Amino acid sequence: MEYKSPEILIDITMTAVRRPDILKRTLNSFFRNIFAPIIDRCRLVVNIDPIGDDIASHELCKIFSAYFKHYMVNMPMESSFPRAFRWTWTRSDAPWVFHLEDDWELMESIDIKFMIEMMEKFPQLASLRLPFFHSAATTMKNWNLFFPWNGFYFECPPNLRKTAGFAGHPSLIRGEYVKRCAPLIDIKLNPEKQFHGGNEPLLNEVMRWEYGVWGKPNSQRMIKDIGIEWRNANRFQKKGSKAFFTEWEKTS
């Protein structure tokens, strides 16, 4: 099902499973803290894999329609993270994309218009992701790596683009980048890992761009992973290697 306006500014691409309480918490935090001022110009593009609660599709659509006037929903019969990721990206045609998986909570307010202005200032900047780590005076930690503050955002150094340029964390992404990358995604492999190797055509595109992390020096992280407790309580886990997973499985 699809509802769309020709004035859409941002497509919010979301991969999700059937966990309505988590979904509501995620959407509520991002609506309240970032999307509310421009919600009429946002469209949710969401893929819901058949994992989790036994809930009717129309009940899930009620959740989306409570926040979005414009949305597109895909509910496949089988679950596949790579297929879900690629489906959302290939359906996007807005000038800006906000990538958002269904289990993040945004903990402070962000001016999305200012983020867009910053990316317009730097035309080679593919994405600005929200920080999952604290920042120091001149650097921001990204796993075991550090991005320097360039006066505007924390910039991924050229030598780290392959390793840590793109991440699946909530991010504002240039629509052109999504359009270029989407058809190159291999639906047999973990999509996020493909941005770091194992898919040469995609990696070649990745290396053409610059990447950054939003935030300010000496600041706390802005996002929180809220899906771990649900996975443990409902006995779901990522099948095989967690870093390279493509589907979920139920534990005993």
Image (cartoon, grey):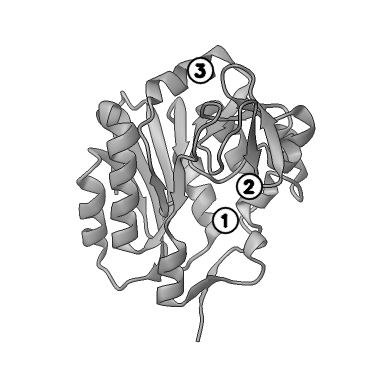
In this rendering, the label closer to the viewer, 3 or 2: 3
Relative to the observer, which residue lies in front, 136 or 209?
A: 136
Question: In this figure, which residue is indicated by the disc labeled 1?
Answer: 82
Q: Position of residue 86 (x, y in %)?
A: 54, 48
How many marks the image carries: the answer is: 3
Label 2 CA crowd tier, 10 Å (few <14, some 14–19, many 20+): many
Q: Quadrant of residue 239?
A: bottom right
> Residue 236, relative to residue 29: is it above or below?
below
Which disc number belongs to residue 188? none
155 left or right of 52? right
Question: In this figure, which residue is indicated by the disc labeled 2?
Answer: 185
Q: Are marks 2 and 1 in contact (CB under 8 Å)?
A: yes
- For label 1, the SS is helix
- For label 3, the SS is helix
Residue depicted at 38% across the width and 21% down the height: 113
Question: In this figure, which residue is indicated by the disc labeled 3?
Answer: 118
35 left or right of 166? left
> Residue 117, relative to residue 211: is it above or below?
above
